[in-house]
Image (spheres, helix red, strand yellow):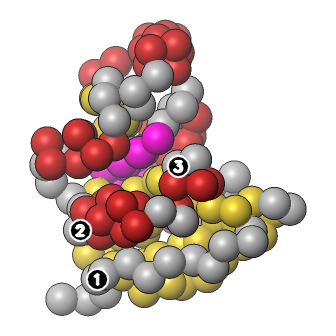
């Protein structure tokens, strides 16, 4: 998915990603683990569902990636103020209804502030919704996959 949608770019397809990855609303962590398999140096995952966190930890062990994965077992709202540093890739796959709420713009702004120069933020949202504006980021493109759209934002140069 990451390479086919152009999120990782040519170098990443060859396994030279090297970025830190942040996966908000991580679920089982599939996006972060794919990025790690393609060369990401570290992955920070945020998930509040106990079963999903268990799956993330199990998958990290199975892949030998324990040392490369940090898991915040809490809500995205609570985790964002605790996350330090910048990330080459930031994934957000929230419940689609959340994207339409006024409070989501604050989450998106905080997530956008964590994107490193030249980095990418990927927002998964309903195809019926327009991609929201993100402070400090420019919408690069959106790719529709049926009822789901992936909107890719790039960090503006400072």
Instruction: Please provide percent x and percent y for residue 41.
Output: 32, 43
- Report the Cα–Cα distance between label 3 and label 2: 18 Å
Q: Is residue 83 above or below residue 117?
A: above
Indicate whether residue 21 is drawn in magenta. Answer: yes
Instruction: Please provide percent x and percent y for residue 32.
Output: 48, 40
Q: Which residues are magenta?
A: 11-25
Determine whether, in the image, residue 130 is placed left or right of residue 158.
right
Q: Residue at x 52, y 62 (%)?
A: 99
Determine whether, in the image, residue 150 is placed left or right of residue 133.
right
Q: Report helix, strand or loop for mark 3.
A: loop
Callout 2: 10 Å neighbours few (<14), some, many (20+)?
Answer: some
Q: Which residue is mark 2?
A: 113
- Report the Cα–Cα distance between label 3 and label 1: 20 Å
Would you say the residues marked 1 and 2 are in contact, meaning their CB atoms lie under 8 Å apart? yes
Q: Which residue is mark 1?
A: 136
Q: Residue furthest front?
A: 102
Q: Which dot, 3 or 2, sits closer to the camera?
A: 3
Q: Which dot, 3 or 1, sits closer to the camera?
A: 3
Disc number for residue 10? none
- Residue 12 appearing in the image: no
Q: Is residue 2 above or below residue 127?
A: above
């Amino acid at each position: 998915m990451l390479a086919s949608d152009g999120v990782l770019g040519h170098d990443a397809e060859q396994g030279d990603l090297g970025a830190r990855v942040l996966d908000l609303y991580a679920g089982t962590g599939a996006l972060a683990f794919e990025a790690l398999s393609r060369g990401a140096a570290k992955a920070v995952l945020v998930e509040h569902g106990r079963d999903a966190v268990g799956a993330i930890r199990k998958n990290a062990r199975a892949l030998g990636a324990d040392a490369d994965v940090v898991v915040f077992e809490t809500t995205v709202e609570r985790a964002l103020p605790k996350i330090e540093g910048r990330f080459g890739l930031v994934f957000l796959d929230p419940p689609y209804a959340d994207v339409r709420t006024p409070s989501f713009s604050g989450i998106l702004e905080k997530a956008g502030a964590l994107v490193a120069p030249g980095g990418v933020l990927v927002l998964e949202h309903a195809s019926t919704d327009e991609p929201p504006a993100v402070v400090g980021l420019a919408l690069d493109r959106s790719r529709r996959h049926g009822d789901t759209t992936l909107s890719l934002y790039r960090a503006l140069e400072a």
